[in-house]
Image (cartoon, rainbow, N blue to C red):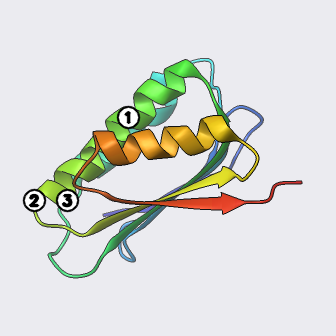
Amino acid sequence: MQNLAVAATESTPEVNFDFETRQFTLRGESWPENAAAFYRPLLTALECWQPAQSGAIEVHIALRYFNSSSTKMLFTLFDLFNQLAQRGQSVVLNWFFDAEDDVSEEFGQELALDFTALQVKLRAEMVS
């Protein structure tokens, strides 16, 4: 499976999907004009991936800002990881948020409620 690496722009996050090491990272901001077009290659790659049964899958999400259309696509992405977990994969979702941003923290808490097969870990950071 070919890895995905996309540099961040003003409106799209950095993407680093490393299928061999089972590390998946989104970092930055997500408010693209067409969220579906931006996220579709990520979703397609994840849908096509057939992981071996060994080792944990680590998902790192560190988004300072994301709009409503990105939220819909993120939920689709998290659902794919949740499906992997339901099929026996160990999937850890690290949700990084600004320690002073209650909304982002609450969003992470909602992820734990909505995607029960994932091991959601909330990670507060000080963002200056």
Residue denoted by label 1 = 75
In the image shown, does 2 or 80 lie closer to the viewer? 80
The residue carrying pointer 1 sits among few (fewer than 14), some (14 to 19) or many (20 or more) residues within 10 Å by Cα, namely: some
Dot 3 and dot 2 residues touching (CB under 8 Å): yes
For residue 105, side relative to residue 19 (left or right): right
Q: Is residue 65 above or below residue 88?
A: above
* Measured Cα–Cα span from mark 1 to mark 3: 15 Å
Q: Nearer the viewer, residue 125 or 47?
A: 125
Residue at point 36%, 67% (across, down): 19
Instruction: Identify the residue under disc 3.
Output: 85
SS of the residue under disc 1: helix
Q: Amino acid at mark 2?
A: Arg
Secondary structure found at label 3: helix
Could you say where residue 82 lies in the image, as x and y percent from the top left?
A: 24, 50
The answer to whether residue 42 is visible is no
Quadrant of image for the C terminus:
bottom right
Q: Quadrant of residue 20?
A: bottom left
